[in-house]
Amino acid sequence: MNAEMIAVGTELLLGQITNTNAQFISEELALTGHNMYYHTVVGDNPQRLSDVIRTAQKRANLIIITGGLGPTQDDLTKKTIADVLGLELVRDAKAEEVILNFFKRRGDGPMTANNLLQADVIEGADVLDNVVGFAPGMMLEHEGVTYILMPGVPTEMKTMFTNEVRNRLEKAAGDYRLESRVLHFYGIGESRLADQLDDLITKQTNPTLGTYAGKHEVTLRITASSQNAAELTPLIDELEEKVLSRLGAYFFGYDGESLEEKVVRLLTEQNLTVSAAESLTAGLFQATLASVPGASRVLRGGLVTYATDTKTSLLGVPEELLTENGVVSETTAKTMANNVRQQTAANIGVSFTGVAGPGSHDGEPSGSVWIGFSDETSTTAKHHLFARDRQYNRERAVKEAFWQLYKYLEEKTAKTSH
């Protein structure tokens, strides 16, 4: 089925609540073999909700609505949908019993009558149990369109979908399935990546390609559909091979694995450790690395030497070296990386020295960054000019260091495998 999701709630339009339900439902629909074509958000207004439903009826045969099933006056979803469909609301005995028993057990005062409004359902609907809250969900088919109503509270919605909705949608899809694979790239912009794949994107039918610009990286999604689930993986594999033959130099991982997660995994597999000496990044590299589970096995520690004198007192960078070469220099970056590696007994030392911005420093412009890299055999440093705002320059420096680490570890893996 071709689906549209309608999220009901003025708080969503005001930005007071993030619509996490949309992401969850879209992911689940793809897994159950349905196409999500539209997302709509509408406030707690019966006329606007009616208009949205009538629009959805013209372009979707599966409409999923979340929110507006509670006991207050602005919880108007089921009444509005019933009116649009020309149906009545009826009291569901099971849902009513759940509500009455809850307030009876609680025993801290009388129940207000509006709580029982949550037990009202659209006549003829298949009632979906809510084991987390009060308001039941509903699923009904009317004039060729299937409607699914669920609570807007994410915990209630996700539990209801998992327990009550998913198996129904899988049966409705029959053998038809969708499968997606996400590829992550670094060091190439979205426009250039799309240009490199222009012929594949222009001629796409099945599988399809979609590019997305992420934070300092680009994501490519390959999606295949088939009545035969066994055909999906080969279809995706074939297109992925074409993509990586052109862009493999920028590829680092699949689906939800971040660059730092990939680095931690490779460090762990190779039994290597890393430490860092950070100036402009002020510990951001180590904090990012430590956010990955299992980082304790690979992160030896490091030093934040933001001030010039701490580079000497803590890292042992000679004053004359700093005076002669400057704080933001290849020599300083190399010395920082080598010294922190030795001081922490790590296999790899990484260093950052540069100008976060917005102003210049010692004649170096904002965004000028040296990243040092040291192991037991050599010490190098590479210059970058990011030239954006302060936070971007710091984050991009950290990302660049992880990319350098990743390429280094991938090369070691390749040598070992040979």
Image (cartoon, rainbow, N blue to C red):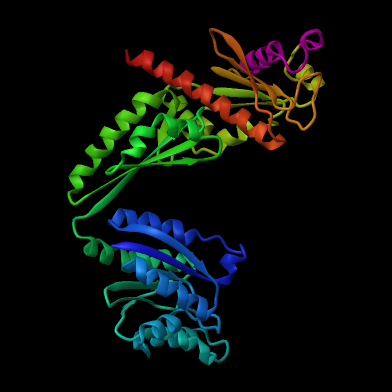
Q: Is residue 131 visible?
A: no
What secondary structure predominates along the stretch shown in magenta? helix
Relative depth, front residue between 206 and 269: 206
Q: Is residue 126 visible?
A: yes
Q: Which residues are magenta?
A: 318-343
Relative depth, front residue between 58 and 417: 58
- How many numbered marks, from 0 up? 0
Figure quadrant of the C terminus:
top left
Would residue 207 appear left or right of 156 to someone viewing this image? left
Would residue 166 appear left or right of 310 to someone viewing this image? left
Q: Is residue 375 above or below residue 367?
A: above
Q: Residue 292: percent from the left, percent from the top?
A: 52, 38
Would residue 12 appear left or right of 127 to someone viewing this image? right
Q: Is residue 206 above or below residue 121?
A: above
Q: Residue 2: percent from the left, percent from the top?
A: 32, 61
Q: Measuring 80% from the left and 29% from the top, which residue is drawn there?
A: 359
Q: Where, by quadrant of the figure, is residue 150 drawn? A: bottom left
Q: Residue 354: percent from the left, percent from the top?
A: 72, 23
Q: Where, by quadrant of the figure, is residue 101 drawn? A: bottom left
Would residue 269 appear left or right of 186 to someone viewing this image? left
Q: Where, by quadrant of the figure, is residue 4 drawn? A: bottom left
269 is within the stretch colored magenta: no
Q: Measuring 65% from the left and 13% from the top, which residue is drawn there?
A: 334
Q: Residue 16: percent from the left, percent from the top?
A: 62, 64
Q: Measuring 37% from the left and 25% from the top, which residue is drawn there?
A: 246
Q: Measuring 50% from the left and 86% from the top, which residue is drawn there?
A: 115
Figure quadrant of the N terminus:
bottom left
327 is within the stretch colored magenta: yes
